[in-house]
Image (cartoon, rainbow, N blue to C red):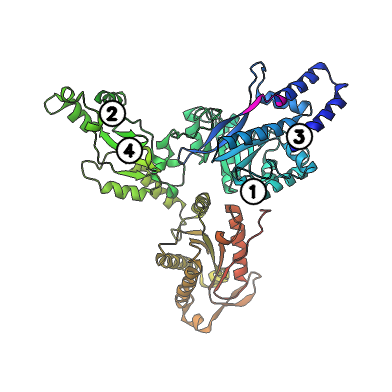
Amino acid sequence: MIVEQLHEESAVFSILTNSQKGNSYQNERDLIFDLIDNDLLTTHFQPIYNQSDGYPFGFEALTRITDPSVNIDTSELFDMARNTGLIQLLDGHARHTAYTKACEQCVQEHIFINMCPETLVRISSDYGLSDLFGTELSIPRERIVLEVTEESAVKNYVLFARAIEQLKRKGYKIAIDDFGAGYGGLKMLSIIEPDFVKIDRHFISDIDTTVVKYNLVDAIVMACHRLGIKVIAEGVERDEEMFAALNFGIEYFQGYLLAKPAMLAQRNYVPIPGGRDRCIIKAAEDKRIGDLAVYTHTVHPQDSLREAYDKFINNQETRLIPVVRDGYLVGTLNRREFLELQVLGKCGYGVALNHRKTIEELMEKIVISIDSEATLEDAARRIQARSKDLIYDDVCVTHRGKYYGTVPVSVLLGAMTEKTISLARNANPLTGLPGNDAIFREVNRKFSEGLLFDVCYIDLDNFKPFNDNYGFDRGDVAIRELGRIILDVLKLYSAQCSFVGHIGGDDFIVIADPGQSEDICSEINSQFKNILPELHGNGDYQHGYYFSKSRKGDLEKFPLLSISIGIVSTASSNIDSYQKLAQAAAEVKKTAKMTPGFSIFKERRAYDLTNI
């Protein structure tokens, strides 16, 4: 309906402008009408790959011209449309074509569809965004990502922001396309508050050799992650660019290196290059064995001895070759055993005896594989359980039951060492608990995995006057003891508790299962009460108070140390980002501190955090 109305308005615009424009202008308008009316525009799909598993997270719908006689590309066509007043018509037609093609192919992944800011503002103003794709959608709105390009100037940010808000309320996801290459920049980022940011190809190109680009992308990714925004690297064409981008923790990748646009949405698995280098991508404590996996070329069970022999000889670093049938791991070939026993043989007749045999007859059929989501500790325990002959063999990794890659034991050991160092580096020096960076990563990991959890914000009441009166040493004891108590209590809930962190000073964070958080907090309060005689001394403890200077410098009576705990739950709120969670946690802690003594306050209402 909207497209047809735009077509009629464009025709009126044509009558008003024909007398004022030259032949070239009219020819451009005729070309656009001809391409639309004769169905000469189609859609190609380019996969956007998830770096964590190598499968498409979604597909970008790209408009393509099917008439070979038209010697312009799509970007030039859209520039013509802007110059001739037909941008709403062309943009609407391309959008509906993309949606229709995606429905025809039953695309189950996210579908990224481009939308010009000019069109967005116009539709918001004139039609109230009744719906972009009709009332009955074959693809849920939650899987439709509208890419708003930054290359066009936004004339009216009020209407623009209103349109974005309407789209979000309807359930659509929002992405900023070509970030860094256009007009809006950080202003558009602050107004849209998108779900995704696609870093423009300009910054990804040669990022491995250009210091300025490297640092700019590093800053962009860090800012986006702190706001809970996923990042997509566009236009990746070389392995070196992929390696550099992986170091920033970018979640998704798109480019010719991985897959070119095609008429059919290609759902094939693509091994993300640089698997071994990915040990520095994620926080060490977040790492899984799949993050270390390298895709090693395989052989089929029916291949000959010669094919396996050539693979070993051509790559001297290959220690193990997986044997794969229909994507599933069925066996392995160990380099030393294969070359010494099968090729050379005990008496030097190995080739003569085995050259007619298939790999299936020569391979090691007992395969110990590890799922890609296994932790490094779990993987190490599995390796230690192997026989002594196999303990140093590369580790075979599977994902969703199918072959994923291999991990050398040396790489696994290096990653575990890095984890230990990283934990020590990021820990609070007073309590040894993980600090702010680790808390940030843990919260975002849980959001990305769709997990429900409670955050308990723990704070000592009147800690400053306690510190002033009893001295910094006693203050440090109080903080260390609170950290110890939290750890002791969490051991009682080891099956549900997921994380404890020390924000700094006298503030702590516990992330727990929604069904256990209040019990955990009650036990923390109970155990802390038991150490009050030690912290205050028997005299002050018996009195139930002590004197210290207030913030104004006056001598004032203060109650004994107590704890205020605010609990916010993602299970009963619309919180879906670190920023919103931090805001909500600060509010519930403030509410908890309004009640004197050991208080626990759990917010059970849904938050209105749409402006955060």
Q: Name the residue under label 1.
A: 171
Q: Name the residue under label 3.
A: 4
Residues rendered magenta in the picture: 36-42
Q: Point out the tag, 1 or 2, that comes first from the N-terminus.
A: 1
Crowding near the residue tagged with mark 3, few <14, some 14–19, many ≥20 C-alpha atoms within 10 Å: few
Q: Which of marks 2 and 4 is in front?
A: 2
In the rendered image, the vertical position of residue 486 relative to residue 346, given as above or below: below
Q: In which quarter of the image is residue 69?
A: top right
Q: Point out the tag, 2 or 3, that comes first from the N-terminus.
A: 3
The reply to whether the magenta stretch includes residue 40 is yes
Q: Mark 4 points at which residue?
A: 329
Crowding near the residue tagged with mark 2, few <14, some 14–19, many ≥20 C-alpha atoms within 10 Å: few
Secondary structure at numbered mark 4: strand
Q: Quadrant of residue 141?
A: top right
Whether residue 216 appears in this view of the structure is no
Disc 1 residue type? Gly
